Image: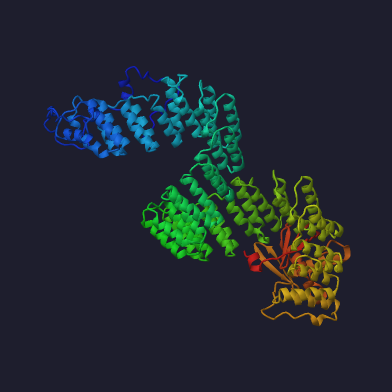
Amino acid sequence: MENPFLGCHPTDPIPNPFLNQSKLFRFLIPPRKTTITPFLAQKPKQKQPLPTAAGSSLKLPEHGGHLQQAITALEQGSPIRPGAYISLLQSCIDADSIEDGRRLHASLCSVQDRNPFVETKLVSMYAKCGSLEDARRVFAGMRERNLFTWSAMIGGYAREQRWGEVVDLFFGMMHEGVLPDTFLLPRILQACSNTGNLETGRLLHSLAVRIGLLDSSKEVRVSNSVLAMYAKCGELDSALRFFERMDRRDRVSWNSIISGHCQCGGHEAALRLFARMRAEGIEPGVVTWNILILSYNQSSNPDLAMELMEQMESSGIAPDVFTWTSMISGLTQNDRMNEALDLFQEMLLSGVEPNGMTVASAISACASLQALDNGKELHSYAIRIGCIHSILVGNSLIDMYAKCGTLEDAQRIFEEMAEKDVFTWNSMIGGYTRAGYCGKAYDLFSRMESSGVCRNVVTWNAMISGYIQNGDEDQAVELFHTMEMEGIRRNTATWNTLIAGSLQNGDPDQALRIFRQMQAFSVRPNLVTILSILPACTNLLSVLKVKEIHSCILHNDLQRDISIANALIDTYSKSGDIEYARVVFNGLSGRDLISWNSMIAGLVLHGRCHDARDLFNQMKQEGIRPNKAIFASVINACGLDGLVNEGKKLFSNMTEEYQLSPGLEHYTGMVNLLGRSGRLREASDLIDNMPIEPDAALWNALLTAARIYGNIRIANLAATHLFKLEPRNPETLRLLSHAQALYGKSNDVSKVPRAKKEGSVNESHGCCWMEVKQKVITFSTGRQLTLNSESKLAEINSRIMDTNEVIPDFDGTILEIEEDSEDIVGTHSEKLAVAFGLVNLPTFRAIRIAKSESIGFLQSQQHMNINKGETYVQLRLSEVTCNIPTEKELFSN
């Protein structure tokens, strides 16, 4: 119904309800001309007096007779007074017997001198016996409706929580000139609260002021309802102003204003109000404590909620089942499952019997922990206390059994449930898809539609995720497109599933296309979306893509999340833009260990080792305790800068000062550190004395150092161990052969086993790649360039020889061994890439080069002076060794 007061101002006068009430609002609608039509109409029988002979008179219930005898007498045409008829209707209400009420309704014509209270009672009877449709028909047929009639009708809809219709009835009531009283107005205000209808709530507030329902200092029921309406509608400022102006505040008033602040996230303000409540002499009850405890649990702060529960007990108020359930559910939602189960046991020991919600929360904790035995115990307990038929408990049991891998038990619970909702079906379907049984999941998916339960977006997402995880991407995409045709709007989780699936199947470009399509459909990305898509951008071609995603993050106000900021730092670093990574890092208001580690590792990756060490010292000054990953990065930084003593000190400080046991990554860093400085014997001794078994990366570091310094004996030793660990890797023999070609063979070279000739040698060695105009160009050592690029290469070589300009020096001494000597293998691939980039890339464009075993970023500034024809080039290259995917995986366009 349209609000007839939309154009009214709150200060407009409202007529006195006690003067000419029947004429109010009569101008809004024409007079009602209705005749009463009984629900069960029948021809009136000839009225006969009730028998009066002694012993044969039928007394009505109020006189000690029986309801059925009285109804039978009425059906035979016996007359009855209104008061007696109303008493019979009340007996039907007390017995919750709508059938007897309908029989009485059919005999309505037997009531003598009928008045509006009779029909009002009929409305009340139908409403309280659960048939609002019958109540509405009687209500619509009444000649005259008074405040009591409207109260009966509105009360019936309020009991059924049909709040929208309560508001509609209120406006219909006002059309007929009937104003609510102190008993009815709170129900209508409650309807406004539950529907978020702030506009109508303000109108009711104005109405209450005008007709004097807020004047009584003793009656706070209406005032509390107005206050609760503002609080539940999120109008906290109005609620607070109203609260401060209240002449009298009781515990309900304080509960409403505290709950309003909790609902809007004002937890500190809620605690201040709580303290003020106690200071004003109103001791909080269990409801007040529960409001605060529930709020803190819902805001992911169960520790403070637990403190409040302890204060509650120390105040002499025993936690009730709602308190315990709130705490158990809060711990479960915050992934503290063991604590939730411990608290459930404590609840049982305290003598408080759980309800269905409590048991369901405890079973959910068992599901997350995959604690099948505990879950079975809770299953038995649910049967014992009679809550096994609760749909909430049933759904939790299905989820628990499915996650614990006992799908037969989950299916048995599913089939035994008399009532199934969408969560029941989703839990069972999700269980099958997680276990890889997509066929059985699809059977349930099809059955669900025919069962009358509508499939929601979670159902579709479960099926799509199941097909993705099982490698059936085509079926997943087909379901994705079918969703819209079925009228199911795809949500963020739907798109996230496809993005994660594309990345899982090694197709980052498709993931990026889906991400862009998601934005085109105006679907807002969330934390999961961003953290899924950023790892697809850690390569040379993705610098602009990272900035595009960064823009999306800012647009959707996600930059405050520390995990997203950390991922941005890492992605910018790996895609070659260390300056943007530093901007994100400096903009963080709070940094965690991952933030520091990502930034330090990024600086090391780009050869800015001095900056990395400075950042490490700054972190320690701010009181942040470094972890193993940060130590590994800083040791690598010392190795790149040749700071042997500082690196050794860091390595010893790990155990002595920070009690951290070095891992393989730290020993590998130390071997690199010692090997780069020529301390090969010390590096070899370190390996011999290691408490853990060396891996291939560590032996490879020793082999690299031995090649650089021409120690063929140690190179052979490292190669022998590498052959044992990776017998099918032909690169070890290739690297060793190059070293022997440069420095001569050792006497014990024959002891080194030869690699098995299975498959071809990876042709990517001796190659590097660079991006030009969104295409990846491959440069191989010894390759011929175009005429312009050849002249640029000659110019570079000339300037290097004549002017001692900075040259990329890979490892501080010589280039990678596969490009050891240009006289042997031809021009280095990196030098070819630089020459090509200087000719083909725009001025001031950074030249970024990637190698198969290492990534280097050449930051080049090219200043052109056409008149003089002179070019000044400054080159810097930083290189770290790391495991890189194949060329196709890393540089697919």
Viewer can see residue 410: yes
| Percent of width and height locating residue 626 | 75, 52
Q: Quadrant of the N terminus?
A: top left
Residue, far front: 55
Image location (x, y in percent) of residue 616: 78, 51
The total number of labels drawn is: 0
Q: Residue furthest bottom?
A: 750
Residue depicted at 57% across the width and 24% down the height = 280
Res 721 → quadrant: bottom right
Q: Position of residue 481 (x, y in %)?
A: 46, 59
Is 286 positioned to the left or the right of 881 in the image? left
Q: Nearer the viewer, residue 16 or 420?
A: 420
Percent from the top left, x then y, of residue 16?
A: 37, 18
Asked if residue 859 can be seen in this view, the reply is no
Q: Quadrant of residue 159?
A: top left
Residue at x-position 85% and y-position 79%: 746
Residue at 45% across / 50% down in the picture?
Answer: 382
Q: Residue 663: which quarter of the image?
A: bottom right
Along the viewing direction, whichever of 114 and 768 lies nearer the viewer: 114
**Up-down: is 797 above or below 421?**
below
Image quarter hosting the C terminus: bottom right
Residue 639, above or below 822: above
Quick one: 66 or 713, which is closer to the camera? 66
In this image, 885 relative to 245: left or right? right
Q: Is residue 666 above or below residue 454?
A: below
Colour scheme: rainbow
